[in-house]
Amino acid sequence: MKKDKILVIGACGQIGVELTLALRKIYGAENVLASDLREQNELLKGTGPYVSIDVMKKDALQLQVIRQGITQIYHLAAILSATGERSPLIAWNLNMQGLLNVLEIAREEKLDKVYWPSSIAVFGNSSPKQNCPQQTIIEPSTVYGISKYAGEFWCNYFFMRYGVDVRSLRYPGIISYKSAPGGGTTDYAVEIYHQALKEKSYECFLKEDTYLPMMYMADAIRATIELMEAPAEKISVRTSYNVAAMSFSPKEIFQEIKKHIPDFTISYKSDFRQTIADSWPQSIDDNVARKDWGWKEEFNLSETTADMLKNLQL
Ligand code: NAD
Ligand code: SER
């Protein structure tokens, strides 16, 4: 068992719940402190320590870090793309100040490592649509994307200037069955499974041919832990790594689900999230992550679909 003491901030969100559970398996339940603004998620109850933390309150957060002997922080608290467009300044404030609080605490308390996720949302209309490379023209058009891109450079700055070992992935849309997604443009690819089972019909807020990069949660968790456990000398990117697994459109995920639920139907009524989706790449080139620390996905669309439907019916 490793000796690290980990704090997960935003542990009750879509990724936080599963990441906390996975970290507890590796590091021991008592060594992974889950925290969030919200009440503890049902799936976390009884699995390890939990504390209520607002990442915006730096002094209280720092006190917890000192008291609990924290050595690593996984900082997941953020406002995602669709919710961010409804309240841009609130999203900017949380996404930037929350990260700066964590980075400052990591510097002051000399933490071993910090994890902070970026997103494919850093890319904008001027970035290549197909196989979007690690380094390219990056002009984000959402407040979420702007905050992630600025965040990437703050991570790089804290590494270069202060030696804070901060690591990051540009997640694509994450598909999962355990905890609900929190207001992103890619959320349709989770909702669709629930609606297929519950109603046998789904009204999609994106057009049928909108391709976006996606990843199954099991792969996202493994990518995160593999990145964090990689030797420091293997990490050549201190802004944030492109990672990819699959790309598909609403029509393709519908057709895949229909193989399991033949009477499933879909209709399309795009809303403001279409503009966000259209500004992002359709597929991502993640060769740098593959070369540096051996990233490789395990789940494609048909494996994801089979696993989602099986687990949602348990
Ligand atoms: P989520 O919205 O499901 O969870 C975020 C959690 O942060 C929530 O539980 C929320 O209560 C908590 N939180 C909000 N404000 C807080 C505060 N002030 N203090 C403490 N906690 C607070 O988000 P998620 O989907 O789990 O995403 C986690 C991270 O991964 C985010 O940084 C997000 O940008 C990034 N990401 C997610 C996806 C995806 O598809 N889910 C894709 C790319 C990047
Ligand atoms: N899934 C996220 C979103 O749609 C991408 O960062 O906001």
Image (tube, rainbow, N blue to C red):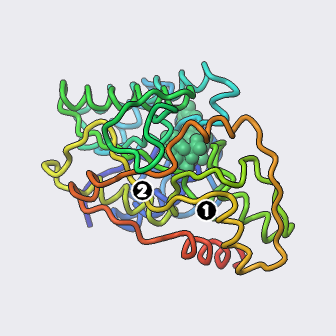
Q: Nearer the viewer, residue 164 or 34?
A: 164
Q: Which residue is mark 2?
A: 244
Residue at coordinates 55% horizontally, 27% vertically from top-left?
Answer: 141
Q: Position of residue 267 (x, y in %)?
A: 83, 57
How many other residues sit within 10 Å of disc 2, few (<14), some (14-19) or many (≥20)?
many
Looking at the image, residue 253 lies above or below residue 73: below
Q: Secondary structure at mark 1?
A: loop
**Residue type, numbered disc 2:** Ala
Select label 2 or label 1 by which is in front: 2
Dot placed on the residue nearer the N-terminal end, 2 or 1: 1
x and y, in percent, of residue 128 in the image: 43, 40
- The percent coordinates of residue 31 (x first, y second) are 36, 56
The correct choice, above or below, for 218 with respect to 137 in the image is below
Q: Residue at x 63, y 71 (%)?
A: 308
Q: Is residue 192 left or right of residue 140?
A: right
Residue found at x 48% / y 26%? 146
Q: Is residue 140 visible?
A: yes
Looking at the image, which is closer to me, 281 or 87?
A: 281
Q: Hey, what amino acid is under mark 1?
A: Leu
Place of residue 159 in the rendered image (x, y in percent of width and height, measured from the top left): 22, 32
The quadrant in which the N terminus is found is: bottom left
Secondary structure type for disc 2: loop
Task: Find the distance from the CA under tag 2 to the CA under tag 1.
Answer: 27 Å
Residue located beneath label 1 in the image: 43
Image point 49% across, 50% down: which residue?
A: 172
